[in-house]
Amino acid sequence: YLLFSLSGCPRATFAGKKGKLSGDEILNTKFKTSDVLENDEEIKQLNKEISELNESNSEMEAAMVKLQSQISTMEKNLKNIEEENKIIEEQNEALFLELSGLSQALIQSLANIRLPHM
């Protein structure tokens, strides 16, 4: 940002010589210069806040990536557990069918046994 004084401005010098700039106008111009300085400070403050927000956003994005990775790992683990459970259920069903067959065979073999009458 460049700040110019009225003494270095050809138009202000020319207008001042003609008497077109009053004292109030010159004071208003000086206040405008202080406004520029205040705006410069505000811009610096805004830039600082933008930098802080960018840093915060970067941290949040990193945390989100980490969470997504953890979720992905948990989903894979859950899928593996579901597949293992399915295999166990199939094995249980096969064992139950085998047990049913054995119990039927036992019942049939016991039905053929004749006990002596007492």
Image (cartoon, rainbow, N blue to C red):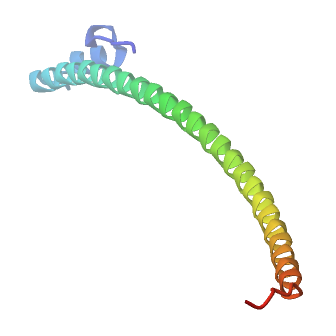
Residue at the image point whose x is 61% and y is 44% from the top: 71
Quarter of the rendering containing residue 53: top left
Identity of the residue furthest to the front in this view: 118
Quarter of the rendering containing residue 109: bottom right
Q: Is residue 95 above or below residue 56?
A: below
Q: Position of residue 99 (x, y in %)?
A: 81, 71
Residue at the image point whose x is 81% and y is 66% from the top: 95
From the viewer's side, name the closer residue of 22 and 56.
Answer: 56
Give the tally of numbered discs. Answer: 0
Q: Is residue 47 left or right of residue 19?
A: right
Quarter of the rendering containing residue 82: bottom right
Identity of the residue furthest to the bottom in this view: 117
Q: Position of residue 36 (x, y in %)?
A: 28, 22
From the viewer's side, name the closer residue of 68 and 53.
Answer: 68
The quadrant the N terminus occupies is: top left
Identity of the residue furthest to the top in this view: 8
Q: Is residue 60 above or below residue 40?
A: below
Q: Is residue 95 above or below residue 44?
A: below
From the viewer's side, name the closer residue of 85 and 100.
Answer: 100
Q: Position of residue 67 (x, y in %)?
A: 56, 39
Q: Is residue 94 above or below residue 50?
A: below
Residue at the image point whose x is 71% and y is 46% from the top: 76
The quadrant the C terminus occupies is: bottom right
Q: Is residue 16 left or right of residue 59?
A: left
From the viewer's side, name the closer residue of 18 and 110.
Answer: 110
Identity of the residue furthest to the left in this view: 24
Q: Position of residue 46 (x, y in %)?
A: 34, 27
Q: Is residue 13 left or right of residue 82?
A: left
Residue at the image point whose x is 22% and y is 20% from the top: 18
